[in-house]
Image: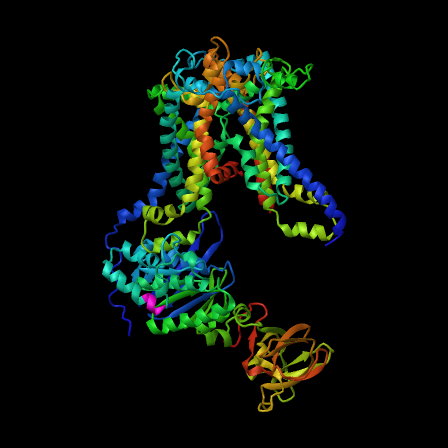
Amino acid sequence: MPVTHTNTPAPLASTTPWQDKMQVWLPKLILSPTIVVTLICVYGFVIWTGLLSFTKSRFLPQFDFVGWRQYERLLNNDRWITACENLLIFGGLFIAICLLIGVLLAIFLDQKIQQEGMIRTIYLYPMALSFIVTGTAWKWILNPGLGLENLVHQMGFTDFKFDWLVNSDMAVYTLVIAAVWQSSGFVMALFLAGLRGIDSSIINAAQIDGASKPRIYWSIILPCLRPVFFSAIIILSHLAIKSFDLVTALTSGGPGYSSDLPALFMYSHSFTRGQMGLGAASAIMMLAGILAILVPYLYSELRGKRNA
Amino acid sequence: MAKLDLIDIRKTYPKSDLETLKGINISIEPGEFLILVGPSGCGKSTLMNTIAGLEDISSGEIRINDVDVSGLAPKDRDIAMVFQSYALYPNMTVRENMAFGLKIRKTPTTEIDAEIKRVSELLQIDHLLDRKPSQLSGGQQQRVAMGRALARRPKLYLFDEPLSNLDAKLRVEMRTEVKKLHQRLGTTIVYVTHDQIEAMTLADRIAVMKAGEVQQLGSPYEIYNHPTNMFVAGFMGSPSMNFVPITVLENSDGHACTELTGSDGKAQLLALPDKLKTYVGKKLMLGLRPEHISQQLSHHSETDLISAARFNIEILEPTGPETIAQITINDHAVHCRLAPDLSITAGQDLDLMIDVSKASFFDPDSERNILL
Amino acid sequence: MHSSSTSQGDNGLGRWLIYGVLALMALVYLLPLFVMLVTSFKTGTDIRTGSLISLPQEWVTDSWQAAWGTACTGVTCDGIKGYFWNSIKMVVPAVLISTFIGAFNGYVISKWRFKGSDLFFSLMLFGCFLPFQLVLLPMAAMLGKLGLANTTTGLVLVHVIYGVAFTTLFFRNYYINVPDELVKAAKLDGAGFFTIFWAILLPISKPIIMVTIIWQFTSIWNDFLFGVVYSGADSQPITVALNNLVNTSTGVKAYNVDMAAAIIAALPTLLVYFVAGKYFVRGLTAGSVKG
């Protein structure tokens, strides 16, 4: 059958230059609301907060500029100093313990474990909970009268004392316990994904070279997971710095302000104590904290990419 | 069937000082099969995308049937394209894949059905119409991709390395298929490939590209036998053309000749075409294809331009139909094509015949073919 | 195989150790949930006389009814049921709108790149890292100006604005792996911006839509910060109500009611997690922004 090409279907006759123009502008048009909102509600608002931090705003924003006054007040404020110290203790322990548990569980789970799926599900479910729920649960478990302390007493150890929740020296550590419980499973998942991504021929080669299992993990696999360590640290420190719900639910910053954290400090000064200028200054300090972690990370990432 | 004219096409990407396309001029006749070849990064895919309208050109004109389409959107150019990855819509069946373009053009359903029937029978995919692309083999996906292009009966077909994802055997089969299809339908095709055998077997004309420029545009025969420069000569052919630096001499009879030195350091004379007499005393690059150096052939007598010479065979690579041997001439490794049934071993000396009548000669500085 | 007999023996012991540690940790992770559950079914006396992990002497649902309908959350004593519905009224539109916008944004950023779109994407990524404390005060002022202070609509708006960075990231990362040639082929077939989206990309986006919806649902349902700052008495989400309930100090501390309320607050996200955990985990790892 000879094939003729005379009955070619007509190309889109309906298109006009106007419609073609539209095709060029549509993507920009679609993205523009998000661009505008991001520029205003993220970058604009950060600048606004920055401006507020130089004013003496109390219950309402007002723009009498007082220079660095609020920052001076902040650095002379005992509660703020405590909050920052607490953040270092809480953040440091939280990150270290999460990494340790996460790596170990991931390595253990990577040993062709039966029921791996179920175990993973159990380790990760706390991540689906609100920090408020977590705080509520641990507040009950850790309460000195009827909680864990009582349980150990009933087991016969009547001298056991566990009053961290109401002990102003120890309250901040209860935050670590609850936060680790909630987030370590997630770190495990990150590392497990990293382990699964490692080329198994590297491990085979090391085995043929005669390396023992712990040796392989220590000197080959863990170094391969460096990027996972970095992203885990970034995520966890981000979680720690903005940690607000957990401390609210578990200790409310107490006893006194002994377990206060910057995020809680910012909230209570801005919204309940009518110290908006001080609150804004503390928020800017939090931003500085995030940047101090993020900028070196991004810098090394970008440099690494350029070298690659 | 359409005529395609590319007139001084230039393309510079934003934020780049380099021109990706540096003034491409090609005219493609109705029904012609044009192949663009070149190393990766030579601009062949960019050129293809500009013809399709997927990328803008910086200057120049693209004319289809003498109508300037450079400013038109891809859909208004009436072009179909077959992609290397096939780009079949994964959520649609084979039938829906082929019908998509027709539906958008508001073709009546009965016409769509007839068209799909015609194309699927032509490509022998009529039994696959209700499958999803993921349920097809690579070769079948390839056919569907071609079917999708054929179903719209566009003015022009673009093929972007359509066979390179297939395994070797299937690639040869599909190559034949594409050739049959073109002979049967007589469509105008622009086809990008980096496979020079595909280029040689399929093309009416080949455009060899490098660094955004067309190095040579011609029939496969011209490209292979009369390359305009060393790049084209080296790019087409496998094993590629041997380049041997020589100095043109004049022998006692007044003919042009040169000396070839083997690995043993002994020089042998090689007669050169008399056209080269003007180059006496100059250095040239002698381009010899492997098949132009062979074992002594009984039916070939030694003529003016077929010389015998004895060389040490260093490496033998039997491929089955032939044996590739490596020798050294003027300190350069040279490959030659020998018959497979010669009983020789590596390290032996062998009398070879060199057919200079088919050789190319290049200026060592400009790399241009001086006999063209 | 090298040194099979000895390493086999070590392996046996080693495996027991591994299983032991894994099982112990599973218990540690499960214990709080177990404690919450048993406590919520205990009577007040049972709590005071029993231990943390003992089963209830008598299973009662009083505290569940109290938590749902009569417990005091601050000044009112109507339980948390109203707040549960507040959360749903907030979560559903916020999730749908932010997912919808994110899908389009991701489509544009991955497939219709234009000058500046990559730069904008980086700017938006930074938004994912921003502690929300930096925007709390101006946002409060803006909601006030818009007349949306203390309303569910206001909360939806806030969650959409700060959720879009994540939803866009999800869709962009998904679409970036869809070959560009698919879009080119559709363009040559005559399809335009919307046709390509509806007919080609959306039908293959089911996994990422699931991931995004689940991620957004979980984070908005669990949010406390925006809830406590921007909601009014009658628009408070459940997390705020739960916190108020736990911290309302009238009479004897009713831990059983606290636990029942906490479980109710956690139930929707837990349910989603156990039903669609696969997508939840994928969202978590995808949300762990890679620079």
Q: Residue furthest front?
A: C58
Q: Residue furthest top?
A: C251
Percent from the top left, x then y, of residue B296?
Answer: 63, 87
Percent from the top left, x then y, of residue A176?
Answer: 60, 24
Say left or right for C157 vs A299.
Answer: left
Say left or right for A291 vs C183.
Answer: right
Which residue occupies the foreground of this view, B117 or C110?
B117
Above or below: residue A182 compared with residue B315: above
**SS majority, magenta:** helix
Q: Is residue A127 magenta?
A: no
Say left or right for B158 vs B288.
Answer: left
Total numbered labels placed on residues in the image: 0
Colour theme: rainbow
Q: Evaluate whether residue A196 shows in this view.
A: yes
Q: Quadrant of residue A238?
A: top right
Percent from the top left, x then y, of residue C145?
Answer: 34, 20
Which residue occupies the foreground of this view, A260 or B213?
A260
Please provide the residue range marked out in magenta. Answer: B119-123
Above or below: residue A231 compared with residue A175: below
Q: Quadrant of residue B181?
A: bottom left
Which residue occupies the foreground of this view, A121 or B109?
A121
Q: Quadrant of the N terminus of chain C?
A: bottom right
